[in-house]
Amino acid sequence: MRSRTQPLALVNAELESYARRGVFRSFSHMQGDDQHAEFCFYWLWNLPFHLTFDARRKALSFKNLLPDVPAGSELERGLKALIKSRSSSSRDQPEHRRLDPRRVSIHYSNRRGQVSLVFRVSNGEYQHAVTKALNLVNEIFVGFLNAQFPEYTAQHFRRQED
């Protein structure tokens, strides 16, 4: 029988492996209890990221990942289209870019312009979910925002427009 802390241990181990490889800087893990934890790290463009783990909901959350995204805007429509394209089991995308909905699903929310992403884990696929969540966030920042919305990137993340 699995222990109650095993999912948290799996998530922590996967994130620590990214930190050991130098993908993250200043990685820390703040555990509230066996069911909740927050991971903080500097990552893309040396920005701070916060990933929350909730064992009861079987969820990994990037709360308030993107600021000032107007509801219904071109930016939001593009984000939703990107997420939808990665969340299907269709073969339109290479395997490493797809999220298998039988293993992990993604939920987008925009509350008062603050975009959050929640990754729901199925069948105990916590390590897989961490990898897929990080891959998608990386693609959103580096591939999508940087390429298609450089003015937003420059304004909100101190990046210079090319």
Image (cartoon, rainbow, N blue to C red):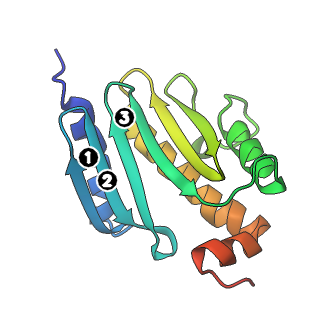
Q: Residue 122: x, y in percent?
A: 44, 23
Q: Residue at x 73, y 43 (%)?
A: 80
Mark 1 element type:
helix
Q: How much space separates mark 3 and mark 2, taking CA atoms?
A: 15 Å
Q: Does any portion of residue 27 appear in the rendered image?
A: yes
Residue at the image position 59 percent from the left and 80 percent from the top: 158
Kind of residue at badge 3: Tyr
Q: Residues within 10 Å of mark 2 (few under 14, many from 20)?
A: some
Q: At label 2, which amino acid type do we have?
A: Phe
Mark 1 and mark 3 lie on one chain; the one further toward the N terminus is 1
Rendering coords of residue 4 (x, y %): 19, 24
Q: Which mark is residue 12?
A: 1
Q: Is 134 displayed left or right of 26 in the figure?
A: right
Helix, strand or loop for disc 3: helix
Q: Could you tell me how far apart the alpha carbons at marks 1 and 2 are, in whole angstroms?
A: 8 Å
Considering the image in quadrants, where does the N terminus appear?
Answer: top left
Do tag 3 and tag 2 residues touch (Cβ < 8 Å)? Answer: no
Secondary structure under the numbered disc 2 in the rendered image:
strand
Query: Mark 2 = which residue?
Result: 39
Q: Residues within 10 Å of mark 3 (few under 14, many from 20)?
A: many
Residue 156 occupies quadrant? bottom right
| Residue for point 40% across, 56% down | 50
Q: CA distance from mark 1 to mark 3?
A: 10 Å
Using the image as rendered, state which of residue 125 and residue 95 is in the foreground: 125
Relative placement, left or right, of 33 versus 85 is left
Q: Position of residue 68 (x, y in %)?
A: 66, 60
**Which residue sits furthest top?**
1
Q: Which residue position holds label 3? A: 126
User: Considering only vertical position in the picture, is 90 above or below 13?
Assistant: above
Query: Within 10 Å of the Cα at label 1, are there few (<14), some (14-19), or many (20+) other Cα atoms?
Result: many
Left or right, 117 with respect to 147, comes to left
